[in-house]
Image (cartoon, coloured by chain):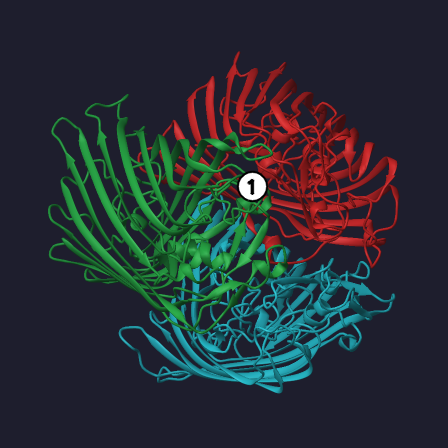
Chain colours: A red, B cyan, C green
Amino acid sequence: QPAVAGPIVEFGDDGYLQIDVKFQGIADFTDFGSGADGTESRSDFDLRRARLVFTGMINDTWGAKFQTCAGTSATRNFGAGGYQLAMSNEKLNSNIRLTDGYLIGLFADSMNMKLGLSKIPLTRANLDACFSPLTHERSSFVYSPYGTDATKNSRDMGLVLSGNFMDDHLKYFAAIMEGREGEVRFYNPFNNMEFITSPEPSNSFEYVGRLHYAILNPEGGPTAMGYKGTYLGKKGTLLTIGGGFAYEADAAYKNTTPAGDMGTPGFLTTKVLNNETVDYTAYTADIFYEQPFDNGGVITATALYLNSDFEDAYKTATSVADQNSIVGGGNGQKDGWYVKAGYVLPFTVGEKGLLQPFVRYEDWNLASYLGVQDQGVQQWGIGINYFVLGDQKVRFTMEYYNTEFDKSTKIGDYLQMTGANTEMYDSYDVVTAMFMVSF
Amino acid sequence: QPAVAGPIVEFGDDGYLQIDVKFQGIADFTDFGSGADGTESRSDFDLRRARLVFTGMINDTWGAKFQTCAGTSATRNFGAGGYQLAMSNEKLNSNIRLTDGYLIGLFADSMNMKLGLSKIPLTRANLDACFSPLTHERSSFVYSPYGTDATKNSRDMGLVLSGNFMDDHLKYFAAIMEGREGEVRFYNPFNNMEFITSPEPSNSFEYVGRLHYAILNPEGGPTAMGYKGTYLGKKGTLLTIGGGFAYEADAAYKNTTPAGDMGTPGFLTTKVLNNETVDYTAYTADIFYEQPFDNGGVITATALYLNSDFEDAYKTATSVADQNSIVGGGNGQKDGWYVKAGYVLPFTVGEKGLLQPFVRYEDWNLASYLGVQDQGVQQWGIGINYFVLGDQKVRFTMEYYNTEFDKSTKIGDYLQMTGANTEMYDSYDVVTAMFMVSF
Amino acid sequence: QPAVAGPIVEFGDDGYLQIDVKFQGIADFTDFGSGADGTESRSDFDLRRARLVFTGMINDTWGAKFQTCAGTSATRNFGAGGYQLAMSNEKLNSNIRLTDGYLIGLFADSMNMKLGLSKIPLTRANLDACFSPLTHERSSFVYSPYGTDATKNSRDMGLVLSGNFMDDHLKYFAAIMEGREGEVRFYNPFNNMEFITSPEPSNSFEYVGRLHYAILNPEGGPTAMGYKGTYLGKKGTLLTIGGGFAYEADAAYKNTTPAGDMGTPGFLTTKVLNNETVDYTAYTADIFYEQPFDNGGVITATALYLNSDFEDAYKTATSVADQNSIVGGGNGQKDGWYVKAGYVLPFTVGEKGLLQPFVRYEDWNLASYLGVQDQGVQQWGIGINYFVLGDQKVRFTMEYYNTEFDKSTKIGDYLQMTGANTEMYDSYDVVTAMFMVSF
């Protein structure tokens, strides 16, 4: 059974079921996003993640995990990476969805299995638990391509193996995932229409591998298949370096166009011009450092680089949905990096409360982003975390961040064509206030 | 821990998680609603509310609540208040959604916090637990404006504080909610199309306040943030008077039209004519009385008045969706009242069973309702509750109710334009049979 | 309390709540389904069923069941029975839905009640637990008509009574269900459009009855309201024969057409030509045999016949959605049968593991199926189950199956009209690998 347990129900001889309840609520304040032309400032309160988690083991080897995710916001949409404008409030917003669901097989320290829907083990950031980020959220640009939903670009269906060697200092992940599948519907809130991508060219799997080496303390045990953005010093001194790759052959058609002219229904769908295809290749490297001091202060610092490639298909796959969700968009072809750092202050607020100021800087080159090709995006943020009980169970976070574009953009108006939002932006500002509760 | 507990799992030193399962199933019989022209009588069985509720506390102060809601019906749709015609049966009907999700902070008897998605503390009726109404359901006209879903018109994202003074006789609620946000999609089942409202004019919060004073016994403890439609006499003699208000500046545009002619796609969307806006203001008053007698009989009686105002914007905001879901509709500008009364009969049916006959009368003036402006609606009902185990855990209810319109209406055909339903109605009749189970 | 229990929380004097977690994950490999023209081979990984089940009793008589179901696949769609082509990957795919939700009343061995959303007690196959099929899945052709979702064609809202007589050898089911309701939206993935059926002609219930007689051991106790596809010999020697019927008067309009020409919006909807209606009548018979041998081997064999009739309305109800989801399609007018057999091998793999090879053959005559009228479908499969722990808790299954059509078809292109998929098929092949975990 887990060392730090939430509510647990035991059953049979060796079985247990743990139930976790988790919320992440957010208030965003931006300098655009309301009004008839979309240029008035806006506030948006939403439940970014509302989760029930059921983790059970039948015996020491076999078990399963069922993790739900619900959200409430009409107007905050991370689908394509980045920030999108205001949209409607309706019933479907608060749907509860399955975000992780897999069979667990704990066969040996060197081989643990997740079979089903689980995280793609490519980037460290994607494997960071989303209820313990260092800043208010993981980077928007560390996900995988293919879908508009976390069940495809953060998770995927497949087989993931993981295990530890060298007294838990060396950990590997190896995965065969479904990868590209079918077509993708891509919603454009500005004209309330769904665009449809080209289909998968042919059957091919996505292969993903990752290694990390913990130079100082080991970061996780054999069954740990994720990371945290900060451990608040509780694991001692950590220095972990990691790297990974992903590959899928024939992942997308190279030459596509909208199937009709703008203004006609065909414009929403995709015409494949010929049989040429492109492969998907990605690689990443990352480093994580955490150092607790005798006075109670804790330094945390981390950096990550990611390169995703579709053989420059964004130049020729001009279908609207392809540009924004397969070969382009926040999850398509790109490269970039971030660095983040935080410091737990060496005193408590109240009996147990901890304060952790943090900063971050990100720099990304995106093949096609929000209607602009060869775009560059820089984002920097500064903020503070308050851990009320001295752990991740109850947390408040405030962050101010600024996003700059190399080329002026309409921010999220993927076609630069809808009349509603005529303003061009070189940058925008957001203040985010967040609470988290997790048990 | 709760005094009357369902299934509870304890964890840590002081933590617990309570899990509740609740169903409310309904069979409606109406004198319209099937057949090619919609004029044949209809029966409709549906799960009005199917709920899993997870309520947990980490310690005496911090906790969280996760309440789901699923329904099954294609053809019973309370979105705009009132009754709508038959629609399709499809996969999305049975989605499980999040209906309440918030961080709990119990700081003092005088200050308890709900932060996240929770009930708007304006009307007593909205704060009544939906699994203990006096009649078969709360009034259709006691909700807040802005959305077509309970996550906006009954609940909202925000901060709600509540607390007791004067030995629990005086309770206050104070809330800052998100209020109006983005646009609203409004579904018209008669032509299978979605209409879109004008956007929020600019960033502004909704402020809500409420006070009640219990003249006799206190109605709820410090952490109780809701009411019941009937306590079956278990709280002794109650006489509670309450009142509340809500306000949001610049809640809606005053002058809008459909963006195109009827029959064109533009007709579904909204054109804002100029920058004039209107404020939203609402106030309410209510009284609740319950008196158990020595012979076992219990009288329950309650009345409520509500006034919601958008500065007569229904006269100029002529966009279809605005008329039906922002400034008009069952949740827009209106005023009216209801009175309800029930009597628990002074004998048991079987060992513990209780019978409670009830009556109700409602009278509402609606600015714009189902395509008719300045409409008046009167509704009266008579029925009986059977509490099988003498409490709210297993309940059967039967109610007959009649709805009359001041002006003839097509009932739910918001445009009076679709050919499917050509009949004009001055009134309609419904018989509703209901079961509830809750533990 | 259940004899074989998963996680259970007790409450009150006699109450308990059992929580089950269940997954069924599938990898399909087909000889069609990807590429620009849909003729390339395809693999598809999905969670066919991801379930949380909450079953609770307040006391010995009253309780409730809440069963959820989530899936992840964009491209495997059983709605109309059979197999459909690839579609998009998007947020709604992973919605968690309510699949069973009802009030339980255990009044006597001869009368147990389910009130709410529960299984239609017509065919044995539909009553088979979906987490213990003999082959990789139940037949695609054993469901009821009217809806495109399991909440209408496998389950329905209503009252189901069941009970045992003659020392549990004789069991009856009697149900009044909602049956046909409103209209049905029918999604055609090939042109990304929704077709709408004709409405229910008038209010009428569906009546369902079923009897079985266990000639040897009784198959289930008084409160058992379902079957298993295989008991792995744990119930001893079984020979059960059963039969059932279903009937709804005026279930559908007899004469309908698309409301407009192909290519116009009206084509998607339905025009009712006159008031003539047809009744729905179905009857079924089935047999189940299981025999454990002294050496540990177990033979399981079962057969089923089903006839569903709409008075040949498929000849005159030519609306597209009517043809495919009410009077025709995989759940409309048809008759056919299947036979399945398996054998648990008389040795264990590892300490407890069991192997069970199986075969099946199905032969169905369908009034209107995937755009072809008077179609015949034959399906045969061969495979093997591996029960890792000797029971249904952890299971792996592999099946190869072949489907043949009497007349060439585009497979799932209901109109034979969309250009995307030009290939005509006489047959197709599928290899399915599956895991199940259930506790």
The chain ID associated with circle 1 is C
Q: Is residue C260 visible?
A: yes
| Quarter of the view holding residue A82 | top right
For the residue pair B254 and A251, the one nearer the viewer reads as A251
Could you tell me which quadrant the C terminus of chain A lies in?
Answer: top right
Residue C146 in view in this figure: no
The secondary element bearing badge 1 is classed as loop
Badge count:
1
Type of amino acid at the residue the image marks with label 1: Met
Q: Quadrant of residue C161?
A: bottom left
In the image: residue C348, left or right of residue A285? left
Return the residue at label 1. C87
Quadrant position of the N terminus of chain A in the picture: top left
Residue drawn at x 50%, y 56% as measured from the top left: C320
- In this view, B307 is above or below C412: below
Which of C246/C374 is in front? C374
Provide residue A396's location: percent of width, then percent of height.
Answer: 69, 44
Q: Quarter-wise, where is residue B339 in the image? A: bottom right
Relative to B222, residue A283 above or below? above
Q: Position of residue A32 (x, y in %)?
A: 83, 50
Horizontally, residue A379 falls left or right of residue B139, namely right
Which residue sits furthest top? A166
Q: In this orientation, which residue lies closer to the viewer: A37 or B20?
A: A37
Residue A97 in picture, x, y percent from top left: 54, 46
Using a 10 Å C-alpha cutoff, classify the residue at mark 1 as few (fewer than 14 neighbours), some (14 to 19) or many (20 or more).
many
**Image-based side of B24 in relation to C187, left or right:** left
Is A204 above or below relative to A89?
above
The answer to whether B112 is drawn above or below residue B421 in the figure is above
Residue B153, given in percent of the width and then of the height, sits at 64, 65
